[in-house]
Amino acid sequence: MTHLDGNAMAGPLSEIFAVDVSAATGTCASCGLVGPVAGLKVHGPDPGLVARCPGCDEVVMRLVRGPEAAWLDLRGAVSLRIPLGS
């Protein structure tokens, strides 16, 4: 199965967050791998985006967008460190 890198989520996530989340560092809940959101393996876009850990292939993040709302599931991430700039 082919996939894109985590940068594929930058545009859709920018509609929700005021910062660039692709530069955030996440920790996989399954294997503990720490890395940038841009390094996740993203599948989609329909019916939504599914981002998997590049280490263990478990789902870290899901994003589904409708006309009036977006759903973001982060249950596969222990944490998400978002740089706020200086």
Image: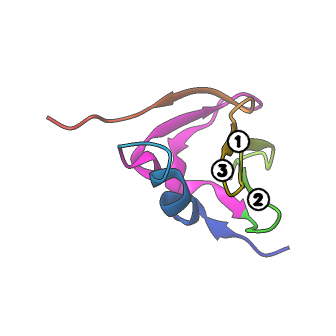
* Residue 54 % position (x, y): 68, 53
- What stretch of residues is rendered in magenta? 19-42
Q: Residue furthest bottom?
A: 2
Residue that badge 2 annotates? 48
Viewer-side residue, 10 vs 32: 10
What's under tag 3, amino acid-wise? Glu
Q: Which sits earlier in the primary sequence, circle 2 or circle 3? A: 2
* Residue 71 % position (x, y): 70, 42
- At x 45%, y 46%, the residue is 21
Q: Quadrant of residue 40?
A: bottom right
**Numbered tag placed on residue 68 in the rendering:** 3
**Numbered tag placed on residue 71 in the rendering:** 1
- At x 74%, y 29%, the residue is 75
Quadrant position of the N terminus in the picture: bottom right
SS assignment at label 2? loop
Bin the neighbour count of mark 2 within 10 Å (Cα to Cα): few under 14, some 14-19, many 20 and up.
some
SS assignment at label 3? loop
Front disc: 3 or 1: 3
Bin the neighbour count of mark 3 within 10 Å (Cα to Cα): few under 14, some 14-19, many 20 and up.
few
Coloration mode: rainbow
Q: Is residue 16 magenta?
A: no
Question: In the picture provided, is 29 more to the left or to the right than 85?
Answer: right
- At x 21%, y 38%, the residue is 85
What's under tag 2, amino acid-wise? Gly
- At x 47%, y 38%, the residue is 25
Question: In the picture provided, is 23 more to the left or to the right than 70?
Answer: left
* Residue 76 % position (x, y): 74, 33
What's under tag 1, amino acid-wise? Trp
How many circles with numbers are drawn on the protein? 3
Quadrant position of the C terminus in the picture: top left
Viewer-side residue, 78 vs 18: 18
Q: Which sits earlier in the primary sequence, circle 2 or circle 1? A: 2
